[in-house]
Structures are given as C-alpha cells and as structure tokens.
Image (cartoon, rainbow, N blue to C red):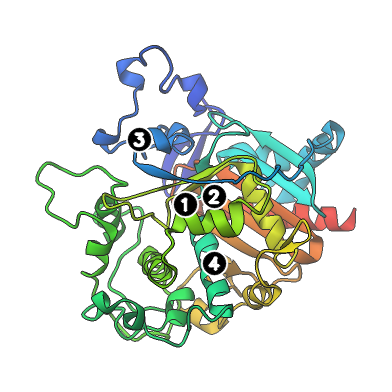
C-alpha cells in the first residue's frame, strides 16, 4: 500500500484511502466496523474523514443556504484533451521533488478540483465519496464568505469598522473583545487567549467545537452549550492590532455582529446576497448549534462548482451575470491586503510576504493571488492577473495547511502561469 509521511507519521495515500474502496458506510446496514458515528467523536479521524467531509449533514444539525429560483450559471464540462495536457504538466514542490499535476492530486488527498480560466471550465475531477452535486466541507473558506459580506456591510455603512465590538454586542463587555474594533476582528488582529493548534487535543478549538455541537460531548461535559455562551468566556491576551493571530472565534464574533445589525441569520444572508444570485447549482448548508446559530467560522458546506462560481465572482471584482453582487471597492480592498509586517509575526514560514485582509490570505505575488483556505486541504485560489480560479476540496489526514502547502502552492502557481501563457 503506497504511503505518505507527514510530521513523522505515515498515512495511506489518496488512492489507498479512498472511502468507497474501503467500504465506509456502505451496505444495508453498514458493517459494524465500517460505521461512522457522531457520538464516538472519531468521525474526523483518518481515514474516516475522507467520507465525513462530504456527508456532514448526516451527522450534525444544519440549515440550508437556499440557491433561489434562478437558473444555474452554465459551467460546461472541460475538454478531455485539455484535461490530459494539464495532468501531464510538471512542477517542483517545495521539498525539491518533481511531480506531475495528476500525481499531486492524490498526494494532497483531493476529493474534487475545478479550474476556471477566463470563466471557462478547463479542468474538473472528483474522487472517493465526492460527486458533482454533493456538498463538501469548506471549513475556513467559510470565513472568507462571511467577512466578504461583512466588508460589504461596512461599505454600505450598515457597520462601522472603527466601532468596538461592545458597541454592537454589549454582552461582550467583560471579554477579550470589549475594546477590539471591528477592523481588528476582520483582519484577525485581536489579542484573545484561544489556542488553535489542531494537533493538540486539549486546544481551545475543540472546546469551541463542542460548544457549537460540531464535536461529541462526554457524559460529564459541563462547558458552554452554544456559540454565544462560549464567546463570552474568552479573555484578553496582549494588545489588539499588534499582530496577525488566526482565531476562528473572531469569525463567530463577526457573524454575531452581522446578525445583530441586520436581523438576518447567516444562512439567509448568504442566500440573499450570494447563493441565489451567483447561479449556484445546489443549495449549500451550514452547521448550527443548539439555539440555531450557524458556524460562520468553519461550518459551511457547498458543492465544488458553486465554490468556483463564488471565486469567479471575486475574480471579476464582484460582478456576476451583469450584476454587481459585491462592490468592486470591497474586492479591491481585499486584493490590496494588509500590513505584511504584522502577518510575519505569526510565523507562517511557507507564506513569506503574505498578509491577511477581511479573512482572505493575500500573497502580494506577481499574479495578485489571494486565497480562501481551510483545514484538511480546502482551497479557493484566485489569480486575477492570470484570470484563473482554482477550487479544491480535500480530506488530508493533517489539518494544518503546512502539510499540503509544499505541493499546493507551487502546483497552483505553475498551472496559473501555464494558463496565463497559453
């Protein structure tokens, strides 16, 4: 069985861990040893996760993001010959290995990937449990959706980025967020005592997940029962605005502010502003806690083609089918990025020269690339100067992007440059 090594551990490669071939949740009923159950809290273990990320609605409560009644925006199937030529392209990864594009997909545990060039579908493949109509976890790409809406509300003056969080949420008066501004939240420059080391089972991110109903709770669980009850427990550590610090709780605070200001639930806002106007093929859905609050930081699920449609709208400066869905000024502000010196303090060695703006990762490279990034390999890659959008769903055994970036970053850059030249 071919195996890949990450952080000193070996895992079956993408083909060998295919959830269909392994028989996860197949049969009537599934075999006892092949069942994936929420209450065991092992549904995010590898290789079970290769099934889970495209079946989460079967495990936790969710609410729909309605696609509306408009016709789907056409994305024709790519030409087989063009796909074959892309599969044969070679690049060197950051570890010095020569790989073909096709080989990189298995090495990054890709579940599905689509490439648009000038809005035309030039490459699309699916693997394992994912099929074109099925929703898959976006994880933290959800942050980019939510913050793009928030930045639009700032542009429309429904929100004021200079106001403190407590102006909108008096409930947060005794928390880390009391004196943080909305801009601090949008750019993740809030000094909050919250650990997000995915490899650490005691990290705060897992308590957040249990509060939101996204992880199983033990019988003696005594923690918060929903997102809002959890957020009011967070305390300050350091000074706001001094450095970039990636914390999923920032997005949950942002979504709470948006709901308080607009009266709309996140799923309805996503539907009204994006899903129903992008020409999406399928509804999305988003996980909700015990009081119906959506997880704006990590709980969004959609089909791959609809993620690509969102990326294409961003590439086209907020325009889709002759309508301006997001103000061009909002997109331009995202693409310009933020303070690179503040980002550098976070120590992302593979992302030298990056910054972070409105919950997008900004490369400042020659192609003008900015990205939505999610754990386990989710990626929305937008290269405006190459007129390229790449959307990928994956179920990598290692949550942190540093495990797949040595392949992902050079492979996507190579393909964007290739298409730009072609």
Q: Are marks 1 and 2 in contact (CB under 8 Å)?
A: yes
Mark 2 and mark 3: span between their CA atoms?
A: 20 Å
User: Which residue is at 76% across, 41% downward?
Assistant: 123
Give residue 178's position: percent from left, percent from top. 29, 82
Front: mark 4 or 3 = 4
Q: Which residue is the site of mark 4?
A: 149
**Is residue 240 shown to the viewer in this render?**
yes
Q: Earlier in the sequence, mark 1 or mark 2?
A: 1
Q: Residue 108 versus residue 357: which sits nearer the camera?
A: 357
Q: Residues within 10 Å of mark 4 (few under 14, many from 20)?
A: many
Front: mark 1 or 3 = 3
Front: mark 1 or 4 = 4
Q: Residues within 10 Å of mark 1 (few under 14, many from 20)?
A: many
Give residue 295's position: percent from left, percent from top. 39, 55
Mark 1 and mark 3: span between their CA atoms?
A: 16 Å
Q: Residue 399 versus residue 88: which sits nearer the camera?
A: 399
Q: Which residue is the site of mark 1?
A: 139
Give residue 311's position: percent from left, percent from top. 67, 56
Front: mark 1 or 2 = 1
Q: Which residue is the site of mark 3?
A: 59
User: Which residue is at 47% across, 72% downward?
Assistant: 347
């Amino acid at each position: 069985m071919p195996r890949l090594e990450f952080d000193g551990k070996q895992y079956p490669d993408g083909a060998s861990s295919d959830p269909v071939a392994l028989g996860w949740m197949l049969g009537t009923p599934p075999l006892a040893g092949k069942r994936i159950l929420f209450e065991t809290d092992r549904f995010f273990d590898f290789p079970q996760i290769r099934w889970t990320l495209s079946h989460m609605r079967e495990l936790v409560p969710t609410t729909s993001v309605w696609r509306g009644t408009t016709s789907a925006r056409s994305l024709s199937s790519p030409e087989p010959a063009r796909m074959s030529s892309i599969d044969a392209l070679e690049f060197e990864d950051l570890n010095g290995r020569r790989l073909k594009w096709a080989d990189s997909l298995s090495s990054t545990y890709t579940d599905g990937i689509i490439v648009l060039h000038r809005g035309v579908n030039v490459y699309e493949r699916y693997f394992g449990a994912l099929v074109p109509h099925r929703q898959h976890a976006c994880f933290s790409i959800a942050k980019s959706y939510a913050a793009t809406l928030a930045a639009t509300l700032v542009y429309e003056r429904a929100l004021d980025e200079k106001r403190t969080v407590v102006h909108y949420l008096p409930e947060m008066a005794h928390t880390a967020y009391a004196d943080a501004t909305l801009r601090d939240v949008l750019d993740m420059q809030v000094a909050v005592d919250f650990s997000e080391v995915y490899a650490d089972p005691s990290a705060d991110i897992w308590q957040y997940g249990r509060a939101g109903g996204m992880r199983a709770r033990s019988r003696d669980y005594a923690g918060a029962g929903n997102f809002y009850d959890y957020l009011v427990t967070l305390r300050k550590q350091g000074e706001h605005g001094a450095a970039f610090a990636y914390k999923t709780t920032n997005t949950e605070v942002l979504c709470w502010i948006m709901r308080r200001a607009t009266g709309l639930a996140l799923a309805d806002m996503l539907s009204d502003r994006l899903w129903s106007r992008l020409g999406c093929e399928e509804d999305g859905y988003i996980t909700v806690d015990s009081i119906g609050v959506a997880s704006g930081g990590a709980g969004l699920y959609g089909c791959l083609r609809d993620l690509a449609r969102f990326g294409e709208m961003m590439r086209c400066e907020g325009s889709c089918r002759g309508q301006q869905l997001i103000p061009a000024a909002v997109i331009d502000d995202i693409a310009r990025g933020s303070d690179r010196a503040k980002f550098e303090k976070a120590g992302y060695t593979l992302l030298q020269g990056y910054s972070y703006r409105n919950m997008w990762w900004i490369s400042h490279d020659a192609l003008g690339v900015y990205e939505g990034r999610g754990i386990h390999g989710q990626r929305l890659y937008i290269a405006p100067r190459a007129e390229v959008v790449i959307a990928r769903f994956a179920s990598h055994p290692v949550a942190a992007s540093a495990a797949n970036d040595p392949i992902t970053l050079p492979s996507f850059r190579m393909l964007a440059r290739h298409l730009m030249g072609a």
